Image (spheres, grey):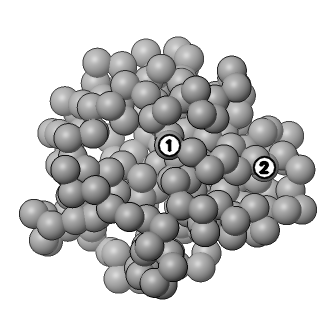
Amino acid sequence: MNEVNWQARYENADTPWDKGEPHPMIARWTQDREVEGDILVPGCGRGWDLQAWGVAYPQHAVIGIDLAPSAVSSARRLCQDLSNVTVHEADFFSLESWYEGNRVGLIWEHTCFCAIPPPLREVYAKTVAALLPSGGRLIGAFFTDITDRASGPPWNTTMSDIECLFSPWFVIEQPVAEHRTFAGREGEERSLIMHRR
């Protein structure tokens, strides 16, 4: 199923997704949006996005999850001065390994959905739906226009795939027109907001 050894990728410095800074869309989304509940960052990597959410919402618990021990250690160091941030070394899909009954209000998606083998996408959709209450939001950057669609990670998806996977549980807004991303990723991603039904 195209499993990836993420720890080995970090040990070999084979981490092209790690830009050393948070995704540019976070600054836009945190300007004027209220959040109810905890903020969850699956596949948090070295913690750049996690740190940005923690700084923007100090009144909220911000929870990061990653499989790779190296990534988790780096994220914990990066966020060590943010008392509202917790990082778990765990499998996002194994809720019993990290979930503590948190009232999650927002899930930030960036390089987790595209990193899992496509056969696990339905599990991802069901997991985020189970974690969010009605009105909760799944927001993030989804790779929908990668030129090399057959290889991965990142694995490409399409808007029709996203609608098929998430619409049973979510109302999906139109892609955000003013999408901002890292240099070199222009035209590959779309910013999406999904509201839990």
Residue 122 picture location, percent across and down:
27, 32
- Rendered view: 64 above or below 162: below
Residue displayed at 48% across by 67% down:
7
Secondary structure beneath disc 2? Answer: strand
Task: Give amino acid for label 2.
Answer: Val
Task: Report whether 146 appears left or right of 54.
Answer: left
Quadrant that contains the C terminus: top left
1 or 2: tag closer to the N-terminus: 2
The mark closer to the camera, 1 or 2, is: 1
Q: State how many labels appear.
A: 2
Residue beneath disc 2: 85
Residue 46 picture location, percent across and down:
61, 67
Secondary structure beneath disc 1? Answer: loop
Mark 2 is surrounded, within 10 Å at the Cα level, by few (under 14), some (14 to 19) or many (20 or more) other residues, namely many
Residue 24 picture location, percent across and down:
54, 68
Residue displayed at 32% across by 51% down:
116
Residue displayed at 28% across by 18% down:
168
- Rendered view: 12 above or below 75: below
Task: Give amino acid for label 1.
Answer: Asp
- Rendered view: 115 above or below 108: below
Residue beneath disc 1: 91
Residue 119 picture location, percent across and down:
20, 41
Task: State whether residue 13 appears in this view.
Answer: yes
The residues tagged by marks 1 and 2 sit, at their Cα atoms, a distance apart of 18 Å
The dot on residue 29 is: none
Task: State whether residue 172 appears in this view.
Answer: no
Residue lying farthest to the left in this orientation: 150
Task: Report whether 89 appears left or right of 128.
Answer: right
In front: 187, or 72? Answer: 72
Task: Report whether 54 appears left or right of 130.
Answer: right
Mark 1 is surrounded, within 10 Å at the Cα level, by few (under 14), some (14 to 19) or many (20 or more) other residues, namely some
Residue displayed at 56% across by 17% down:
133
